[in-house]
Amino acid sequence: MADGQSEVLLLPLGSTVSDALKSSNFEVGENDEVSPPRYTLITSGMEIQIKRVVEYFETVSAILPFERQIVKNESISEGETRLIQAGKNGLEEITYRIVEREDSEQIRVPVQRSVVLQPIPEILMIGAQRGYTPLTFPGKIAFVSAQNAWIIDGETGFRKPVVSTGDLDGRVLELSPDGNLLLFTRQTEDLKDGINSLWLIDMRNPDAEPMDLGVENIIHFAEWSPQSPSERQTYTLAYSTVEPRPSAPGWQANNDLQLLSITESGVIYEEETLLETNSGGQYGWWGTKFLWSPDGKKFAYSRADSIGRIDLEDGVLFPLVEITPYQTLSDWAWTPPISWSPDSEILYYVEHGEPIGLENPEASQVFNVMAFSSENGTMGPLKRKSRMFSHLAPSPELEVHTGESAYSLAYLQSMQPLESEASGYRLIVMDRDGSNPLTLFPSEGEVGLEPGPILWAPNGSRIALLYRKNLWIIDPLNLITQPLTSGGQTTAFDWSQ
């Protein structure tokens, strides 16, 4: 029986359903279903059914709806909305595989999609400007919000955009020591050609345009010399580069260290290589971090297996402390946070401590705040079980009532010291020897800080950090805190005189 008709066949004993099909007048397609199966032996009076199964492909057009993108802008009053770009639907073609059984559709699945017309997103700009209690502070604070650069000069009410290209990636944002120049990185439009590039703008000129320094692919380090500008009115900066890669994390570090001297107008005055491209030790593919000493006379370095100093004349690394590399089991590597004391004599760092359980040393969850003195060698632990992202920040030197110079050490303390790297943090300030710790921020019961930089005001009176993607100022003496931004899109900041 097939197609609503039947045929009667007489076949020899021992014949199969397959033999019956060959003897019949019915055509059997490749996809048709036969019941019972073709290998079944024929019995008297057996009914054989053929069900027609047709498979074909069909292409239809479908609307691609546009998406809505919201950009917060602190230059617009809170609640105000502006349409920056009208949305427009796109068009795609979808090819379906369709299977029909006895003229009834049974299966319809998409096998190919091709975009004929890309949708254009609707972009809405929403004001995020709030009225804050006026707050004064020394120096200038630069920050990146919504991939644009802003500057606040001495008072919260005096803020203005300085770079509005909408493509700052926040990997580098550095004010020159005199607060006149801003160094920053812009992401490359086509990631196949690179990751980002290094730029400069003179903030004294309201009509200044960003200047391309011709340096590309900066991930870990680019920093002004603390002694810039020199007597020749040239600024010196140091940087390290990577090579883009299609695989995670997206680069292969060069672990190099380059010096660039430029004039106030951005003209390159001199270039020098302090460290040639090298393997960078264990996990060297991730990269080495560098740090200029406050006196501008030496560099510290941090990589997965050690911290140390660099001989600037010979370009040689001098390891000070060997570090047991942390086993991340992922596509990133841990490099110990480091920071110089204000007199450039002590290097603070986070060590990867010995395990307290049965785990391997590489998997230990113990991290301690330590110090290395040029006179006394290793000192500490100043703080045990601080966690891996404890971002150390010594304050500027302060004169105490005894007439001596002293300074404090701010760092991030994990709220769950022996948990994974996803733990939240609290800001703590202690004396430089680890005594008298005081928890400043956030308050008990609040969500913890994410790992990030801590910066002191030039006179040591305030601390700045990021909390919930906004910039906050903290007065460690009076325990007063205040947000400086409210858009939830701040990714980087710097503080200079």
Image: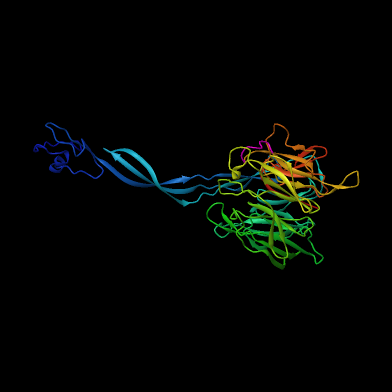
Give the image location of residue 407, x and y in percent.
Answer: 82, 46
Q: Is residue 401 left or right of residue 141?
A: right
344 vs 51, nearest the viewer: 344
Instruction: Point out the residue furthest to the bottom here.
Output: 269
Give the image location of residue 154, x and y in percent.
Answer: 81, 48
Examine the image and state in which quarter residue 295 appears.
bottom right
Judging from the image, the colouring scheme is rainbow
**Magenta residues (range):** 414-421
How many labels sit on residues? 0
Give the image location of residue 99, x and y in percent.
Answer: 31, 41
Dominant secondary structure (helix, strand or loop) of the stretch shown in magenta:
loop
Q: Is residue 12 left or right of residue 480?
A: left
Examine the image and state in which quarter residue 49 appears.
top left
Give the image location of residue 140, x and y in percent.
Answer: 78, 51
Q: Is residue 15 above or below residue 151?
A: above
Residue 211 can be seen, yes or no: no
Q: Is residue 219 above or below residue 213?
A: above
Q: Is residue 85 left or right of residue 238?
A: left
Residue 348 can be seen, yes or no: yes
Instruction: Point out the residue furthest to the right here.
Output: 402
Q: Is residue 283 above or below residue 383?
A: below
The residue depicted at 24 percent of the width and 45 percent of the height is 30
Quarter of the figure that contains the N terminus: top left
Magenta segment includes 416: yes
397 vs 475, nearest the viewer: 397
